[in-house]
Amino acid sequence: MLGHVSIFSGAYDPLVWVPALVWLLDRIIRGLRIMAFNPKFWDTKALITYNQDAHMIRVTVSTSSSIYSIEPGTFYYIMVLNQRNFWESHPFTVATISESGHYDTDTLEEDSPLLNYGSSGELRHASEKSHQEMTFLIRPYDSFTSRLREYAEEERPKPATVRVAIDGPYGKTLPLERFSKVLFIVGGSGIAVPLSYLPRLTASSNKTPRIEVHWAVRQSSFAVYVLSHELGDMLGNDRVEINIYLTGSDVDSRRTCDETTYRLVKWRSQRLNVEQIIDGALEDGDKESIAVVTSGPATMADESRRVVTARTVSSLPHIDYFEESFQW
């Protein structure tokens, strides 16, 4: 690049050096983030499993070497060091933080829960975090995610163990506990966002907000799996309402879950209606505040934003909008 501007006697050199230095600074900061998660970053191991029925990848990473506490709602860039293009990284939101699981590749079976519940608190001593791990939910598509699925399938029925570099955290934890009602409007693997926040919101020592999860999902087998393994502790909680909108053709698969689970969830074989959901929350008579959190397709986010904006008026309860999404 400098060769192209050298004929101008250095007049344009700053236009080359400034962005180059910015890029270098960014690389240094990201390297420090990776080492903050694990000083021996080359030895960070991840367990990868793939559930064919749910069409979902589960990536579990031990956080015992991290110098900071893992918070809900944050996301991390994952780089797989086993592959040639190890510099390729993709962002994924933390789905759950578990403090009870043991990071043992010999005991974790394929039918282990896709997610494990746990609570996130303040910075702890290393001995208290020795068995803490974080889990990501990843839908396999092409390129990077398809390679993750291949790793898992090659080692089935045991989880695949790969070396990874974890770059983060990015984003921030939303102050949802300040609201009297929280609406999660999510689609597909966006269910990771409410899964991330539910343990903290329901374990709060203060008044627990009323929570509604509205989840649009094509594959009922995916919904059944998450309900059976991850949302089981939330079912029956009088402060949490789970609504599932089945938009695919295999709606009858929902009957494969046990009868109690089936009855505690509100099933709908229709598309999710954002306007109806938000208006219903406003009409419940809650005069305090409402948080609307979306994570899903761009059309879902656009519709949610439009509806919230139209209802941000003094005559209605206070309503705030939060969006969790990535655009590539």
Image (tube, rainbow, N blue to C red):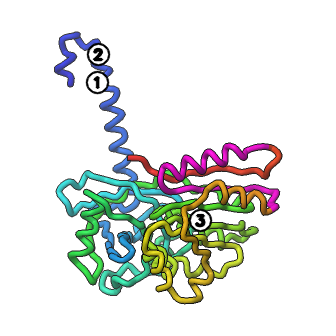
What residue did someone put label 2 on? 12
Which circle marks residue 16 in the picture?
A: 1
Q: Are marks 2 and 1 in contact (CB under 8 Å)?
A: yes
Q: Quadrant of residue 184?
A: bottom right
Q: Nearer the viewer, residue 204 or 259?
A: 259
Q: Residue furthest bottom?
A: 259
Whether residue 190 is visible here, answered yes or no, is yes
Q: Position of residue 96 (x, y in %)?
A: 49, 70
Is 307 one of the magenta-colored residues?
yes
* Residue type, label 3: His
Picture coordinates of residue 326, whole percent (x, y)? 44, 50
Q: Is residue 130 visible?
A: no
Residue extending furthest toward the top:
8
Residue shown at 55% from the left, 46% from the top: 302
Side of 228 where 316 appears, left or right: right
Which residue in the protein does label 3 denote? 214
Does 325 appear above or below 62?
Answer: above
Q: Amino acid at mark 2?
A: Tyr
Q: Which mark is residue 61?
A: none
Is 72 positioned to the left or the right of 236 in the image? Answer: left
Tell which of 21 and 208 is nearer to you: 208
Give coordinates of residue 107: x percent, y percent: 34, 87
Q: Which residues are magenta?
A: 285-313
Report the residue at 72% width, 46% height from top.
311
Residue drawn at (32%, 74%), measured in percent from left and top?
A: 50
Mark 1 against mark 3, which lies toward the viewer?
Answer: 3
Q: Is residue 211 left or right of residue 74?
A: right
Q: Nearer the viewer, mark 3 or mark 2?
A: 3
Task: Establish if 114 lies above or below 66.
Answer: below
Mark 2: secondary structure: loop
Q: What separation in Å lies between label 2 and label 1 (alpha carbons)?
A: 7 Å
